[in-house]
Image (cartoon, rainbow, N blue to C red):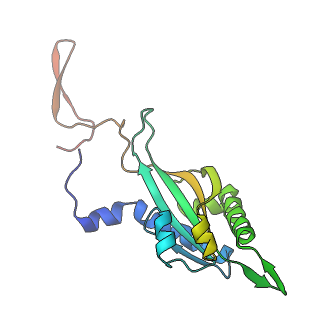
Amino acid sequence: MIGPATIAERLAASRLVGFLPAVEAALKPLFPGVTVRSHPGRIDVSDLIEKDIFLAPMIAVALTRWRGPVGVGGDWRLGLECAAYVVTEDMASDGRVTPRQEVAFALSHGILDVLADFTTSRWGLQNIGSPEEAEARPLFTSETFAKGSAFYAVTWKQSLIGLGSDPLARVLVSDVEAVLDGAVETVDEGGPV
């Protein structure tokens, strides 16, 4: 049975709260020269057109959806849908200009490499599944491209496992009477009185 909990207690118990900071902390040292930060949610293309809130080169990591925690098969996990938004512009290096889409290809490919690495893609967290269904795609319009930026999204699914108690766990009882073969017996399995 679920009991009441304050916001502070829920914050302390939520594994979601620590997920994005862990992803951000793992990606930052792997992408020197790129701003890596968490983002509060899904990016809308109209935001990209109207606002200059993303300064290239940048990777903004976000949770776009979560489900759970108990699946039909009895598994005990919180399924996450994650995104790393890649923001690029044309870059000059060694007297050569690299087009923004090539910079985005390199950064998004780098993120896919991280997601394929068994250890790094755990983000330093315990009880977490491997990333699944990782893919990268463009997320910009001709208008945002004309402004000099390219936006790509790397998305994946990942599960936080072992949240709370096992829903199939047996409840222990104490000081309960049961009738076994016509005789009343006291049952004590060490549960609360």
The quarter of the rendered structure image containing the C terminus is top left
- The front one of 103 and 76 is 103
Q: Is residue 148 visible?
A: yes
- The front one of 138 and 69 is 138
Residue drawn at point x = 58 percent, y = 64 percent: 141
Relative to 28, say whether 156 is above or below.
Answer: above
Relative to 98, say whether 8 is above or below.
Answer: above
Q: How many marks?
A: 0
Of all residues, the one furthest to the right in this rendering is: 95
Q: Is residue 21 visible?
A: no
- The front one of 157 and 174 is 157
Relative to 181, say whether 176 is above or below.
Answer: below
Apparent side of residue 127 relative to residue 165 in the rendered image (left or right): right
Apparent side of residue 120 relative to residue 48 in the rendered image (left or right): right
Residue drawn at point x = 29 percent, y = 62 percent: 10
Residue drawn at point x = 77 percent, y = 84 percent: 92
Question: Residue 166's spot in the image, x, y percent?
Answer: 38, 42
Q: Quadrant of residue 56?
A: bottom right
Question: Residue 187's spot in the image, x, y percent?
Answer: 22, 30
Of all residues, the one furthest to the top in this rendering is: 182
The quarter of the rendered structure image containing the N terminus is top left
Apparent side of residue 48 relative to residue 74 in the rendered image (left or right): right
Of all residues, the one furthest to the bottom in this rendering is: 95
